[in-house]
Amino acid sequence: MSDHTANPLPKLHNAAWPGVVGKGPDSEPPIDLDTMLDLTAAAEVDGIKFDGTDLFLFDPHVSIDSSDDDLKQLAEKVQSRNLVIGSVVAPVWPPTGGGSAMGSDEERGQFLEQVRKGCGIAKKLRELGVRPYGVVRIDSAAGPGEWIEDPEGNQAKIADTFKQAADIAADHGERLAAEGEICWGGMHSWKRMVQLLELVDRPDVLGFQADMSHTLLYLMGYNAPEDRLLPEDFDWNDEATFDAAYKTLTDALRPWTIDFHVAQNDGTVHGTGSHDKTGRHCLPKDPNGKLDIVKRAGYWLRDENGNPTKKFQHICWDGCMFSNEVMMNPQTWNDILEAMINVRDAHGWS
C-alpha cells in the first residue's frame, strides 16, 4: 500500500449526475442514484476510497421538491455507504421548472425559485449532518445564441438575476458557484465569465465552478472566437504556448474559484440526449486527452506563488455523458479515483 496520508485535504468526491445528464428517452436510460452511490463506494485504490458524492437535485436522483422525510432518507442512504454530500446542482433550466436568467420577469422568477429550493435542500442536508461542505451550483440557463442578440443587455440581466440569487443563498447560509461552460450564454467565454462575476460583485456568496474539461474549451474559443487563447492551428505538442494560455485563463478565474472538478478532455465538443454540445469529458487514461491532469490541476489549486489556495474542502470528478457501459465498469471508477488521489498528493494540504 502506498502512503497517501500526507495530504488529507481536499476530500475526494465523485459526481452522481453523470447517471442523469445527457440520458433519457432520446439517449440511454438514466442510471439510478443507488447504483451511482454503490459504484462510488466500491472504488478503492491503495486503500483510499471516495469520501463523498456531489448531487444533481433533479429526478430521478433527488427531486427539487423533496420533503423533509425524503431528505432524511437520502442522508441515511449516503451515510450507510460511508459517504457524505458536498456540492449540489440546482435545476435552473426551463425544462426542469426553472427559467432563463436573462429572460422575462416570469422566467427569471422561475430561475430564482429553483435556486431557493436548491438552497433550502442544501441547508437541510447540512442540518442532517450529511453535508459538511460544498456549494450550490448554477448557470445562466440560456444559450450563447440567444445571448448574442444583445450581449451587454443580456449580461446585465444575468448579473441582476445572480445578485438576487446571491441574496437567497446568503439567507440560507449557502454559497453559489457559477459553472463556466461554453453552452451557457454570458458564461461561454472566460472573459465574459470574469465580467459576469465582477458585475455581480458578491465574492462572499457567488464564485466560480471550474471544470478542467469545460475550461479547456475556453482556450479554444468555442462559441467565443474573439476570446480564444490558443491559435486555430494550435499544435498540442507546443507546451510553451499552452502553458502561457493556461496561465492567463487560470490567473483570471482562480481568484473566483470556490468549486473544482477534476476532468479530462480531448479538445472536442460533445452532446447527448437534450444536452447542448460542450467540452467532451474523457476517461483519465484516454490517449486522446489533451490535459496533463495533475499538472493542470495545480494551476487551479495553487496560487501565483505556488501555495495551495485551500479555498474549498473537496474536489469532484466530473464525467458527464460517459456511456452507461463505461459507467457500469468498476475499473472506470478506480481509474478516476487514482487520478483524484494523484492530484491531491501533488497539490493537497493538511
Image (cartoon, rainbow, N blue to C red):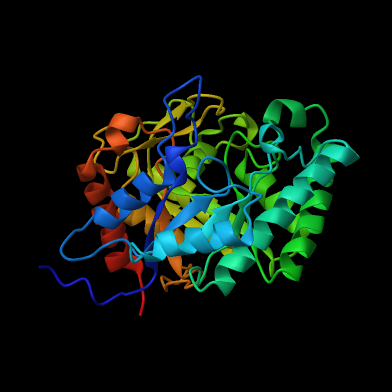
Instruction: Quarter of the image for the C terminus: give it.
Output: bottom left
**Is residue 251 visible from the viewing direction of this image?**
no
Relative vertical location of residue 198 with respect to residue 277 in this rendering, above or below: below
Residue furthest out toward the front: 69
Q: Residue at x 62, y 40 (%)?
A: 189
Near-viewer residue (143 or 196): 143
Left/right placement of residue 278 relative to residue 224 reads left
Q: Nearer the viewer, residue 169 or 297?
A: 169
Q: Is residue 166 left or right of residue 80?
A: right
Residue 20's spot in the image, x, y percent? 48, 37
Outermost residue on the right side: it is 105
Q: State the quadrant of the N terminus.
A: bottom left
**Above-or-below relation of 37 to 223:** below
- 125 w.r.t. 143: above or below: below
Name the outermost residue toward the top. 26
Examine the rendering and report whether any part of residue 277 can be seen: yes
**Where does residue 69 sit, x and y in percent of width and height?**
58, 61
Q: How many marks?
A: 0
Furthest residue to the left?
1
**Place of residue 184 in the rendered image (x, y in percent of width and height, measured from the top left):** 65, 37
Residue 340 in percent (x, y) is at: 31, 57
